[in-house]
Image (cartoon, grey):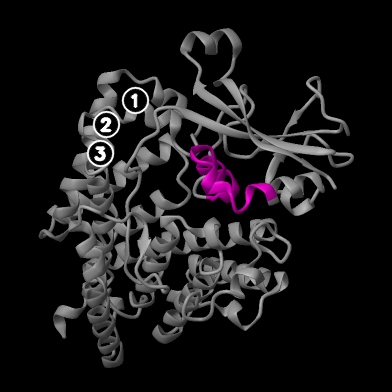
Amino acid sequence: MEWFGAPDFALSRLVLQRLLALVYLVGFVAAARQFRALIGEHGMLPVPRYLRRRGWRQAPSLFQWGYTDRRFAMVSWSGAAVAAAVLAGAADAVPLGAAMALWAVLWVLYLSIVNVGQTWYSFGWESLLLEAGFLAVLLGNAEVAPPLPVLLLYRWLLFRVEFGAGLIKLRGDPCWRDLSCLRYHHETQPMPGPLSWYFHHLPAPLHRVETAANHLAQLGLPVLLFAPQPFASVAAGAVVVTQLWLVASGNFAWLNWLTIALAFGALRLPGSGRSAMGAAPLWFEVLVLGCTALLLVLSYRPARNLLSRRQLMNHSFDRLHLVNAYGAFGSISRVRFEVVLEGTEEAVLTERTVWREYGFKGKPGALSRRPRQYAPYHLRLDWLMWFAALSPEYARPWLRPFAERLAAGDRGTLRLLRHNPFPDRPPHWVRAVSYRYRFTTRAERRATGHWWHRSDPRPYLAPVSRR
């Protein structure tokens, strides 16, 4: 079938696959480095306890055959090794079937992690990685031209990511409609980056331009992804530019980089490599067309969700995360609150008790510490602390276990933090306090050197004893 292959997208496929392999690598390394304290056998939300209530249908995962921390580490580091090999070009150095098997292994391993990760893996970019990763199994390698049906599925995925995010904004917070949301967003976003202070202090008219440009990028450009070339490439290129703007203004794990990767399903780059490609084997064409038909059928519910007034955001309609609904920041916080963990060595608590603060790697804490750049790496605890500041309900299952582990001096938990104020022995008590945070003004920054100002401390979690 001559129409099946799209050799003009050979280089675009190469970039897409390498970026996707890089994101897989980051995801597996983050899982390996953080899981013990979060979901390990003695973690805040242990996987064994979770699996006792859920079988294969509710949580398809390799860990249904038995979970230990050692097995989780093996899955994570094995996934990282395969992802690194694919990133280095292994999938193009082996036959087509073997290349597909490599991508399938990555998908199965990461699916096994996500489906037992509970609230720590409830972010939309987990489903996005799995959906994009499943399509990568069908994308072929250097032996064959990129399959046009799969490239179109990548465009359909990118359309849902961008258009879904645009619709959830228009249907949500009024500040998106009056173009004022970005007056607040750079300050109140989950994890500000090194440049966020400067973005926040842009003139108000530029914030309105930012917001209007966001609507254009998410509601106008995605429609052109299905237009003939070069219009589709122009739209995809504009998506790349807008995502790089988001990369510069904050930390959103690998969401932006994965969205950039998807754009290469429509962005045609020069250099086709036609002469090096053979015709796709019949079995490959049949498999791709069969999976395409399946995914189009499964797309009914996400498509209907886009049209619904009760649009769901970052929702998976099946446990395999094959076709999902996406969206972000349907509402914007006007005021930033931060939950701060503190400990004391004093056995008896009084009004004069001296409390010392734990430092997190990514979330705001010390007023003089400039926000750091961590994306595409995902600091799961820091992100959940942002949700905890929005409402105690988000933190109810895990915050007290977190404080208990700090009081016990648990090494795995302490490795998730930047600073432990009790290096010699654990504190007697640990508590949580909520503060109101805001970026300093330019004058305050010059006078104090601080990036943040905080005020209005309020109790959040009653002191937890070492005992």
Q: Can you tell which mark lies on residue 175?
A: 2
Q: Which residues are magenta?
A: 377-400
Residue type at mark 2: give it.
Answer: Cys
Label 1, residues with CA under 10 Å away: few <14, some 14-19, many ≥20: many
Q: Nearer the viewer, residue 30 or 410?
A: 410
Q: Which residue is mark 3?
A: 214
Q: Can you tell which mark lies on residue 310?
A: none
Element at label 1: helix
Residue type at mark 1: give it.
Answer: Arg
Q: Nearer the viewer, residue 86 or 389?
A: 389
Q: Earlier in the sequence, mark 1 or mark 2?
A: 2
Residue beneath the point at 55% across and 66% down = 84
User: In whole angstroms, how far apart are the C-alphas of marks 2 and 3?
Assistant: 13 Å
Residue beneath the point at 49% across and 71% down = 111
For residue 196, side relative to residue 278 (left or right): right
Q: Earlier in the sequence, mark 3 or mark 1?
A: 1
Q: Is residue 208 part of the magenta span, yes or no? A: no
Main SS category, magenta section:
helix
Find out whether the residues at labels 1 and 2 contact each other: C-beta distance under 8 Å.
yes
Q: Nearer the viewer, residue 449 or 297?
A: 297
Q: Earlier in the sequence, mark 2 or mark 3?
A: 2
Residue beneath the point at 42% across and 67% down = 130
Element at label 2: helix
Q: Is residue 269 visible?
A: no
**367 to 281, vertically: above or below:** above
Residue type at mark 3: give it.
Answer: Asn
